[in-house]
Image: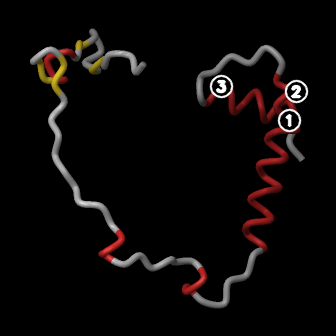
Amino acid sequence: MIDRKEIEHLSDLIKVELKDPEKYIKQVEQILNYFDRLDAVDFDSEETLRKEVKIDGLRDDKYVPFQDNGKPLIDKLKKDPNNYIRAPKMV
């Protein structure tokens, strides 16, 4: 059983401020119950876990460089003070 204290502890660990931790208790319990159901599944062999795909069924890989108005994408990236790279928003 998950309680408010555990939800608050998790929010502290991931540095997220939760205004109402109690609303997440049921969701976290559902997630954990789902994992319990997955753990209960018994597979007799690995054949049921894999699906074979023939090489003929795959597409050909093609390299297509990104160009926007003649500029490569790397030129559009911005660095922030923490040495991260900021990419333009996806639209």
- Give the residue at x 30% y 75%: 56
- Quadrant of res 6: top right
Query: Label 2 neighbourhood size at 10 Å, few (<14), some (14-19), many (20+)?
Result: some
Quadrant placement of the C terminus:
top left
Amino acid type at mark 1: Ile
Q: Which residue is mark 2?
A: 22
- Quadrant of res 37: bottom right
Amino acid type at mark 3: Asp
Rounded to the nearest angstrom, the CA distance separating label 2 from label 1 is 5 Å
Camera-side residue: 3 or 77? 77
- Give the residue at x 79% y 63%: 36
Q: Which residue is mark 1?
A: 25
Q: Which residue is mark 3?
A: 12
Query: Height in image: 22 above or below 29?
Result: above
**Could you say where residue 66 lies in the image, as x and y percent from the top left?**
19, 30
Of the residues under marks 2 and 3, which one precedes in the sequence? Answer: 3
